[in-house]
Structure formats: structure tokens, C-alpha cells
Image: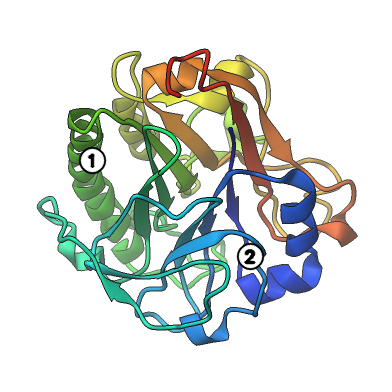
Amino acid sequence: MRIATFNINGIRAAQRRGFEQWLCEREPDVVALQEMRAPAAAIPPDVFGPYHLSYDEGVIPGRNGVAILTRRAPAAVRTWTGSALVRSPDESHTHAVELDPVTLARGLREFATEGRYIEVDLADAPITVASLYLPKGGLPAHLQKPGRMREAPDGGARYDRKIRFLDAFARQLTRSRRDARARGRELLLMGDLNIAHTRFDVRNWRRSNQAEGFLPEERAWFDSLLSPRTLVDVVRTTHPDVDGPYSWWSWLGQSFANDTGWRIDYHLATPTLARSAVAAGTDREPSADRRISDHAAVVVDYDLSAAGLV
């Protein structure tokens, strides 16, 4: 089963840059998408071809939005708001449907309507797949230096908000993982986590120690998610102790040409599913002028039969 995660940085822009061709050529069975950045009515017709769409667009115009594409209609769909756009390839409706309610962890309600998380139970495998778009955040107040920041100093407000999200989401993720196990399912969390976990995940890691996305407290939080008994970083397991493969590069300058990137898009899988990975990597385009997004798709092939999951 080929499964991908892709922050497309706007579905309408991604379509113009070749998203449909990528989808057709790579033929993934499941795709987690982040930053759809479109109300349901503005999704380009037929952009997802033969796939079923589950989509939480959120309430912030032109921002966020997470989706999951599947070849078969999912057995169940869950969001933090209790509703989502769910439609088959031959449907064009734009109304959300009510879903079974999800009990939210303490502190998560602040973020529930922002279109940051959706999960589905696959119909053709005992796997729950989730798509996450984690807040980018900012610098804590003591690291903010006027004149040396692209954004205006905010006294650490964006940083504090991200930390609140991390704390709440860790509790929710534990609940989701245990719920999946109780239903006899593996859990696969994918998406743009806006954190580079280790020095192998940032090209210029020494200069990034005081940059948002590579702060010690963010990396410690990431550490807390992973263990041989809970969740495994699938791509890092298949590419140990090497730089990258990166999944994000700035649009500015020669970052892409020089491969000055960050690895911030992940497959985090429960151990049995993680062990079934037979190939994993990043679909980095051959040149900057052919980029679909500022991110690249992260694609993993899982041999479910070898893991006894079919």
C-alpha cells in the first residue's frame, strides 16, 4: 500500500503547478493533505480524480485545511469539530456531514475549528490514518530581536500558542493511538509538524538552534512522541543517520537548488505498521521551476501482508 503526505500550500495553486500529474503518476492508495486553503465550493472540479475525499476546511478563510484521499470510501471519518466534507469521486456536493463526536483532550478546543486534524479508518486495511497541520509558531520572547526577524515581535504569543497546542495534542494523540488499538487498528499520523526533530533534519542545524521549528523544547516534545512501543518515525528508520531527506525548502533564493532544506513532514506509525515499510522517501522535484509546493510529498510503501495486516 503506497501512502503519501503532502503539504500542497493551496490546492488551487498546486493544481496549476502539476498536482494532478503527480497524483496520476505516483498512484498512492492514500494521501494526507495539509494546507488545502480552500472552501469546499472552491475545490477545483475533478482535481482528485478517482479518490474519495474527506476534508475539514476549518473556519479561517484561505488558511489551513486538512484532507485525506482514499481509493475506497473510508469506514469512518473523525474530526475535532464533528463534521467534514465527505464525498466520493462521482459527487460534487459541498456540504459537510455530521460525524460521530470525538472527545477532545484538555486544551485542544482552542484549536478545534482551525482545520488542523482529520482521521479516517481505512476500509481495506486495519489502519487509522490521520492528517495533521501543526501550527508554525514563533520565537519565545527572550529570543525575539527587532530588526533580525521577518515578522514583527509579538512578545512570544505565537510561541506560547504553539506550546499550548503541543501539550494538548500529545494528550489527544495518546488517546487516538489507544482508541485505534482497541478497535484492532494500527495508527499512522502524517503531516506537516513544523518541527525538525534532529540535526539530520535541518541542513544548517547549528545556525537553527534558536529558530522556530528547531527549538530545544520543540524537539524534546517530539522525543516524547516516539518509542519502540508507541510511534516510530518511518522515514528516519529507513534513512538512519543521514541528512534529510528534506521535505521543505524556502521559496527564496537558492534554497531548493542547494538542498538547504528542513525535514518537517512525517509518517509516524505504530510499531507493527512501521516495520512493514519497504521503501520511503521524498518526491523532490528535479528543478525549482517544477515545484508543486514549498513542500515535497513524503511517500512510503508498506507491505501490509508481511505484517499480517491484510
Quarter in which the N terminus is drawn: top right
Quarter in which the C terminus is drawn: top left
Quarter of the image holding residue 171?
A: top left
Tag 2: residue type? Answer: Phe
Q: Is residue 178 left or right of residue 2?
A: left
Query: From what the image shows, is residue 65 above or below residue 168?
Result: below
Q: Give the image location of residue 281, x and y in percent.
A: 68, 31
Q: Residue drawn 23% across and 40% down?
A: 176
Question: Pointers 2 and 1 in contact (CB under 8 A)?
Answer: no
Q: Give the image location of residue 266, x and y in percent.
A: 51, 38
**Disc number at residue 291?**
none
Which residue is label 1 attached to? 176
Residue 39 visible in the displayed image:
no
Q: Residue drawn 79% across and 67% down?
A: 17
Residue 97 visible in the displayed image:
yes
Q: Residue drawn 54% across and 17% down?
A: 237
Query: From what the image shows, is residue 282 above or below residue 61?
Result: above
Which residue is label 2 attached to? 48
Towards the viewer: 205 or 309: 309
Query: From what the image shows, is residue 229 above or below residue 248?
Result: above
Towards the viewer: 5 or 74: 74
Query: From what the image shows, is residue 30 above or below residue 230?
Result: below
First in residue order: circle 2 vs circle 1: 2
Depth check, mark 2 against mark 1: the one in front is 2
Q: Is residue 76 left or right of residue 148?
A: left
| Disc 1 crowd, CA 10 A, few/some/many (<14, 14-19, 20+) | some
